[in-house]
Image: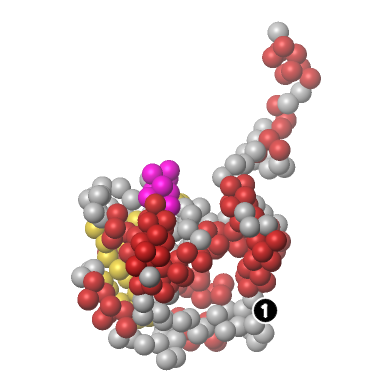
Amino acid sequence: MDEAFEKISRKIRKEAWQLNKDFGLVEEGDLVMVCLSGGKDSYTMLDVLMNMQRALDFKLIAVNLDQKQPGFPEHILPEYLTATGVPFKIYEKDTYSVVIEKTPAGKTMCSMCSRLRRGNLYSIAEELGATKIALGHHKDDVLETFFLNLFFSGKLEAMPPKFITDDKKHIVIRPLASNREKDIAQYAASRNFPIIPCNLCGSQPNLQRNIVKKMIADWESQYHDRVEIMFNAISNVSPSHLFDRSIYDFMSLSRNAVLKEEV
């Protein structure tokens, strides 16, 4: 068990460090607000960032947004974070009641829940003076979002490892964006994290994300490297071979332009 844990631990940290090197997620002097939900991904993200602190001079503060879901075990995160010694704050915002009230019968709750949670987290980051907001999305989340946008929104868009919010106030990072969910699950099981399940949207049947997740899993069962190939594709984009006129100037391509190049 120790050997298996060391192997998966090295893999997760190596991939996260490479992502940090490629995209500059964390910088010296940062105050990183780690959004901790109590799921396997956010616990693993916190561990990864704590490991990075051994080599980089930055601060962490873990933040949990208690959305007042029924049965939420309020004691688990404070006890865990106190034991680890990580500074933390728990914020109570009853977004659960809003989601239940505003979501039409039969519709999924994810979109509204996510939007309300995100707005609250941005406000908290501003209050704390955080320079980065860390979210626990992994490689599988990135690809699922890509296909959800492709199939249902008609756009090529995924989850970048780093982006600035529309109001230019916050930089959001995803330190696990190159880590596979199955590796994170193995790591979390080995670390025996006190997992808190999401009982709001996770129990809803026929979520489009679950359908896409199954589609990707079926592909990978037939072609073991399928996920890595698809992930490489979103890092290897050719604007001149798509149709987006806002990122490639097709109008400048003309016979006259070709003749000038030949001269």
**In x, y percent, where is residue 130?**
30, 59
Above or below, comparing residue 214 to residue 250 in the picture: below
Q: Is residue 16 left or right of residue 111?
A: left
- Residue 166 in view, yes or no: no
Q: Nearer the viewer, residue 15 or 260?
A: 15
Is 252 located above or below residue 149 in the figure? above
> Furthest-right residue in view?
255
Q: Residues within 10 Å of mark 1 (few under 14, many from 20)?
A: few
The magenta region covers 15-23
| Overall secondary structure of the magenta section | helix
- The quarter holding residue 218 reads bottom right
| Number of numbered discs overlaid on the protein picture | 1
Residue 35 in percent (x, y) is at 37, 68
What x and y, as percent, mark residue 66? 38, 80
Question: In the image shown, does 22 or 189 lie closer to the viewer?
Answer: 189
Residue at horizontal 57 percent and vertical 84 percent from the top: 203
**Residue assigned mark 1:** 206
Q: Residue furthest bottom?
A: 71
SS type, badge 1 = loop
Residue at image point 50% right, 85% down: 199
Q: Viewer-proximal residue, 144 or 18?
A: 18
Residue 251 included in the magenta stretch of the image: no
Q: Quadrant of the N terminus?
A: bottom left
Residue at image location 42% in from the left, 56% down from the top: 11
| Magenta residue check for 16 | yes
Q: Amino acid at mark 1?
A: Asn
Left or right relative to 50: residue 251? right
